[in-house]
Amino acid sequence: MRILVTGGAGFLGSHISRKLVESGHEVLALDNFYTGTKENIEDLMKSSKFEVIRHDVTFPFFVEVDAIMNMACPASPLHYQKFPVQTTKTSVIGAINMLGLAKRLGIPILQASTSEVYGDPIISPQSEDYLGNVNPIGIRACYDEGKRVAETLFFDYHRQFGIEIKIARIFNTYGPGMQFNDGRVVSNFIIQALRGDDITIYGDGNQTRSFCYVSDLVDGLIRLLFTTTNVTGPINLGNPKENTIQSLAEKIITLTNSNSKIVSLPLPMDDPRQRRPDISLASKTLDWNPIVDLEDGIIRTIEDFRKRMLSGS
Ligand code: NAD
Ligand code: UDP
């Protein structure tokens, strides 16, 4: 199949493109290189099965493909909050443009949604029928509400035009290839530990996240795309093992053998206090369960960061 991957030069998009090309598919990656880089796809550029086009999904795009994975959108709070209007436009207008393309071609389309649709959840773990607790005017709203409207659009295109949709609600994912300046917690802590800088915990460190290794997540997304049954989602994809941010910092200090000290910085507005996916739906429908535990995944990520730091890339 020829698959359009929007955000294909980003962290997840590049891993997905690599996996699809390795499986014999052709990939057309589309990216405006806001948080994505050419380095992420350097190896893929050598393959005749891969091509990339610089394009912003907020503008219409015409091409002939067999399926779409709509991954374009900055995922790190640091980057999505820097240009919040563009973030909402990317989610909403980007979804309209990609759904329009799927409608014209009559092809399936997968949406990279997020655990952020649950906001600061008051129940745990979060299952797909939980409607969420989102502040519509806070600093995270450009991302959360943008992704929520994108889900609405996906379901309305499905109900009104019969488009085949697949919505994945992705929980915190990490791994090799994350940008040093990404700003998300795993990459921040690893870089800080390797450089011997202070490890910056926002708030008291008792907030929780559940971290999924990138190969597990990519496996789940590709299963969802190719599932033959009429699975629309939304479907949670993530690792259900919950950790405090304090324990993550301590783990990374130990695994890097670092002398870094932990320091506390103010907790940003609306930072969710807890996050943990209920993945029983993914487990049952896709026969999918994450297999890489946090320690293994962090070790692999540290190795990748070390190599890239040494090579200066
Ligand atoms: P990322 O920032 O590394 O990748 C996003 C990619 O989209 C980048 O290459 C960026 O340049 C591109 N992009 C941004 N705006 C664009 C636009 N208007 N037009 C074209 N390209 C654009 O983030 P990621 O972690 O790879 O996340 C990918 C997708 O998965 C996002 O939609 C994100 O919301 C979703 N997601 C990721 C996580 C996670 O933990 N990684 C969790 C939940 C959801
Ligand atoms: N965080 C932190 N220090 C950092 C970066 C993040 O303590 O240097 C915290 C952040 O406040 C949040 C959690 O780690 O509670 C996860 O943050 P991230 O930006 O990775 O993603 P989020 O899940 O909040 O979107």
Image (cartoon, rainbow, N blue to C red):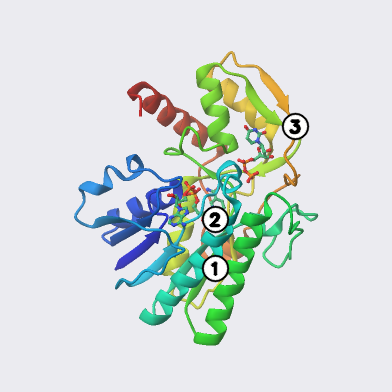
**In the image as oriented, which residue stretches furthest toward the top?**
259
Q: Do the residues labelled 3 and 1 touch (CB within 8 Å)?
A: no
Q: Residues within 10 Å of mark 2 (few under 14, many from 20)?
A: some
User: What element does badge 1 sit on?
Assistant: helix
Q: Residue at x 58, y 80 (%)?
A: 156
Rendered view: 139 above or below 202: below
Of labels 2 and 3, earlier in sequence is 2
Q: What residue type is labelled 2?
A: Gln
Point out which mark residue 86 bears: 2
Total marks drawn? 3
Instruction: Pick the quarter of the image with the C terminus.
Output: top left
Q: In which quarter of the image is ligand 2?
A: top right
Mark 3 vs mark 1, foreground winner is 3
Q: Where is residue 239 in the image (x, y as percent from the top left)?
A: 59, 49
Mark 2 vs mark 3, foreground winner is 2
Q: Position of residue 215 (x, y in %)?
A: 44, 47
Residue at the spot of label 1: 285
Q: How crowded is mark 3: few (under 14 residues within 10 Å), some or many (20 or more)?
A: few
Of labels 2 and 1, earlier in sequence is 2
Ligand 2 contact, mark 3 (Cβ < 8 Å): no
User: What element does badge 3 sit on?
Assistant: loop
Ligand 1 contact, mark 2 (Cβ < 8 Å): yes
Distance from label 2 to label 3 (Cα)? 26 Å
User: What element does badge 2 sit on?
Assistant: helix
Q: Nearer the viewer, residue 286 or 151?
A: 151
Instruction: Say whether residue 97 is left or right of residue 29.
Output: right
Residue at the spot of label 3: 266
